Amino acid sequence: MSTPKKVVVFDYGFGNVRSAERALARAGADVEITRDFDTAMNADGLLVPGVGAFAACMEGLKEARGDWIVGRRLSGGRPVMGICVGMQILFARGIEHGVETEGLDEWPGTVEPLKADIVPHMGWNTVQASAGSPLFKGLDDDARFYFVHSYAVHTWSLEVANPVMRAPYVHWSTHGEPFVAAVENGALSATQFHPEKSGDAGAQLLTNWIGTL
């Protein structure tokens, strides 16, 4: 019997760490909630949750040295997954209430307010997943995931110049307008929705991610 993969839920003060812990454990991972530097660096997978404001999450992440941990892990090809605002802070910048905050800049793009009749986007929605996606493997096109957000990335502009490199899988959803719902880019994955709150579909997605570690 294979040893369960070690996954750290990074505890920097922003995110539903307990629900993420339970969901990952159900999906078969050996899970620990911590902000310990060495533990986070050495885990098979690092999950970065996030709720609330972009600027506050970035401040909390930096205080916990999470920005450095994410960068170091990715430079070594060590898997990282962001959820909700934990996904948003992976982009270059966020704009909230007219204030611009620098993100981790792992991907180009700006997190901006959703333009929809009803905001926040709260509830279940489908995702238009790209063909061949490891994260969405085994999931039907009508699978629904749980979203809670007022901001999103509306354009994707990362160019892959090296033909040897695999282009990222970019997945979309729509609430008033299309927005990026999830991305898979080598060792870095992220979802705007909450897989830990998305029932069987979310459990399958987390199982798929753990299977790539």
Image: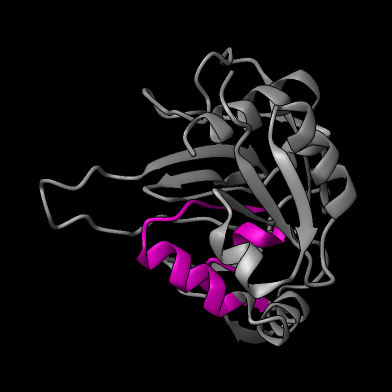
When asked about the image quadrant of residue 25, the answer is top right
Determine the residue positioned at 37% across, 56% down: 77
Could you tell me if residue 85 is visible in this image? yes
**Along the horizontal axis of the image, is 151 left or right of 91?**
right
Q: Nearer the viewer, residue 27 or 144?
A: 27
Q: Residue, x 75% and y 42% (percent of image)?
A: 194
Q: Position of residue 166 (x, y in %)?
A: 24, 42
- In the image, residue 172 sits, relative to residue 186, either above or below, namely above
Spot the residue most to the right: 18
Pick the residue in front: 64 or 60. 64
> Image quarter for residue 114?
bottom right
Nearer the observer, 196 or 76: 76
Q: Which residues are magenta?
A: 67-95
Above or below 19: residue 137? above
Answer with left or right where residue 168 lies relative to residue 146.
Answer: left
The quadrant of the rendering that contains the N terminus is top right
Image position, residue 41 (x, y; %): 56, 65
Q: In the image, residue 163 lies at what x, y percent?
A: 10, 47
* Residue farthest left in this picture: 163
In this rendering, does residue 103 appear at all?
A: no
Indicate yes or no whether the magenta region holds residue 94. Answer: yes
Q: Is residue 110 magenta?
A: no
Q: Which residue appears at 68% of the width and 35% of the height?
A: 29
- Image position of 134 with respect to 10: above or below: above
